[in-house]
Image (cartoon, coloured by chain):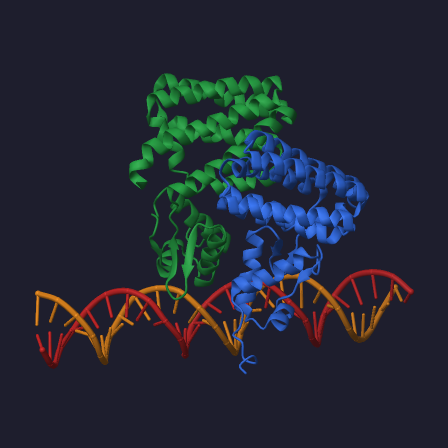
Chain colours: A blue, B green, C orange, D red
Amino acid sequence: MDGMEKRAPTGVEVADWVRNRIRNGRFSPGQRLVEVDIIRQTGASRSKVREALQRLEGEGLVQIEEFRGASVKSTGLEEVAQIYRARIALEGICAGDFARNASDEDKRQLCAVQDQLDQCVLDRAPDRFGRLNLEWHRIIVQGSGNMVIAELLKRLNVPIHRLLFESFYDESRLRTANADHKKMLALLLAGDAEGAEAAMRGHIADGFETLSKIESEFYG
Amino acid sequence: MDGMEKRAPTGVEVADWVRNRIRNGRFSPGQRLVEVDIIRQTGASRSKVREALQRLEGEGLVQIEEFRGASVKSTGLEEVAQIYRARIALEGICAGDFARNASDEDKRQLCAVQDQLDQCVLDRAPDRFGRLNLEWHRIIVQGSGNMVIAELLKRLNVPIHRLLFESFYDESRLRTANADHKKMLALLLAGDAEGAEAAMRGHIADGFETLSKIESEFYG
DNA sequence: GCTGACAATATTGTTGACAATATTGTTGGA
DNA sequence: TCCAACAATATTGTCAACAATATTGTCAGC
């Protein structure tokens, strides 16, 4: 039983730890990230914690002020809108590239997830739908074969992670979203690149539309 | 005369310094970046240098192996292709957004640069054309008003900086590129978002096409 | 001459102590 | 009570010494 003595986490691991907590709201915007606290909770050395925070600053997730340390950067509605615009561009082109050169395995996976999504609609399970929805988008990006874009999207999604679940608690949005998915799936399997791209763009734009209605009073 | 005693550079500044040298080829792919050397050349402390290298690793510009330090990451033709695909998506949507909501000042600037580009074609000055071309693209991204995308593109352009000049030494490519610019300028000023986006996509795709012909034997 | 083992050097990784600054607490007076 | 000045504490920034590892140099043996 060596479970006791597990090695101290590396800088990247600490960064992952903090990033996860930011993503799911365990660390809220504006909150100060005190080095000692993170040391206590992760068991990492101070160097590693500092390294992690600097990495996260590079990702734009935290801001570091001299002698005041790191704090979680908050993303306003304007920036969210810009992120969605970037998603429209990037995931749009990914949809096209998926239609062009996805493997049969990728297509099979997408269909499998689509089946589960359909089930979620019947079951009225918005939370599970949200998670599968992430998976659905991820498969398309992966299947496009463009790792550069995949990396960009992973980073872009962190600050809006919470929002990606928000809209599905609205029943009608959940249905229209799934309808979008089904139409898009047909286009993707048929190899209609342009159609798929247009559909993906519309789908994401609609998502933001719904979202901004829900969240407008929060940011307003 | 206090020029003697200028403060030691900060981590971000060292990162900028190294990034610039990577961008213009002063640090070549695969080259090892020894901490002491950078300390000597920049006057920064070791902590700062290490911080800088970690930041650059986060940007994907260098790779750090344990006890072997940082080395300049090389980008293969495949990755270059993926970067160009991302550029097509992002700059495409920027062109559209520029057409939709650019200020008169932005438009004026773009016209001014276009005039200079025209002059470059007459003067057969490919190097100057390359620099102004960067400026031309930058203005469109800026004018779109999307800072998130602007940041993404700034990063994406670092590894391909050298390539962005390469193709203009071919006379015919220089002419067609400038013709593209002129057509696009008309669409942008007319507020034709869809036309502008399509034009931008084609323009960048053509650029990559020419490039891959030039560089294929290098990467071959 | 070549190879493998060993020593010497160079380079990076880690830690802890200390300095600089911010934040909080306290006290005295109007 | 409130406020300003000061003291105490907390937190971050910096640096240098040391440890761990890689790289290079040397040399005996074949």
The residue lying toward the viewer, choosing from A38 and A169, is A169
* Image quarter of residue A196: top right
Query: Residue at image x 57%, y 27%?
Result: B95
Residue at 33 percent across and 27 percent down: it is B169
Q: Residue B6's x, y, as percent?
A: 45, 53
Q: Position of residue D2 (x, y in %)?
A: 87, 61
Asked if residue A135 lies left or right of residue A101, the reply is right
Give percent across and percent down for residue A55.
54, 57
Give the residue at x 47% y 55%: B52
Could you say where residue C6 lies in the image, as x and y percent from the top left? 23, 80
The C terminus of chain A is located in which quarter? Answer: top right
Q: Is residue B115 visible?
A: yes
* In-front residue for pair B200/C17: B200
B40 in relation to A92, above or below: below
Q: Quadrant of the N terminus of chain A?
A: bottom right
- Give residue A34's quadrant in the image: bottom right
- Compared across the picture, whether A38 is left or right of D17 comes to right
Residue nearer the viewer, A173 or B53:
A173
Q: Residue at x 67, y 42 (%)?
A: A79
